[in-house]
Image (tube, rainbow, N blue to C red):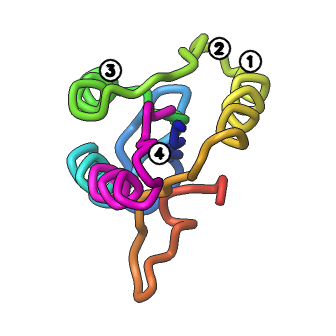
Amino acid sequence: HFVAVHWRRGDRGYQEEMGIHGHVDVALTAPARMVHYVQEVVSDLQMSVHGEGVTGIFLATNCGNQEHLDYVQENLATVRVPSSGDWRRAAHEAVVEQIIMSRAQAVIVPPGVGDPPNVNDTSNFS
């Protein structure tokens, strides 16, 4: 059983340039914040799947910052479909990610702001 994480990095709030990927809300989508949240959710899932456990984490993201991607990889051991970096292929690559995510046991979306948190701050998949 694998889970999927949609980590949106772009077009919201305080903006940091992310190349062809637009801009990122630095606070809401910070790698450490996302990793911590995913670790908590996966821990909860491990206890609820009756010994079968979570065997992998698929990461769908538009993150263009290699240092941030490396941090996530080191802490979550995620699997990704590598981006070609070509904006003309972005839609095709997003569809491939969506197909993979549709097969996951669960889709994890980092929380946004508000009470309850608005996931549209951090994901457009949900």
Nearest to viewer (mark 2 / mark 3): 3
At label 2, counting other C-alpha atoms closer than 10 Å, the crowd grade (few under 14, some 14-19, many 20 or more) is: few
Residue 53 placed where, x, y %?
41, 43
Q: Amino acid at mark 2?
A: Asp
Q: Position of residue 24 (x, y in %)?
A: 41, 47
Q: Earlier in the sequence, mark 1 or mark 3?
A: 3
Q: Residue at x 28, y 46 (%)?
A: 35
In the rendered image, which residue does mark 4 sit on?
A: 7
Among numbered discs 4 and 1, the one appearing first in the sequence: 4
Helix, strand or loop status at disc 1: helix
Mark 4 or mark 3, which is nearer the start of the sequence? 4
SS type, badge 3:
helix
Q: Earlier in the sequence, mark 4 or mark 2?
A: 4
Is residue 20 left or right of 99 when viewed as pictured? left
Is 20 colored magenta in this rendering? no
In the picture of the structure, the residue carrying the numbered disc 1 is 89
For label 3, the residue is 66
Question: What amino acid is at disc 1?
Answer: Arg
In the rendered structure, which segment of residues is drawn in magenta? Answer: 38-58
Residue placed under numbered mark 2 in the picture? 86
> Which quadrant of the rendered structure holds the N terminus?
top right
Q: Earlier in the sequence, mark 2 or mark 3?
A: 3
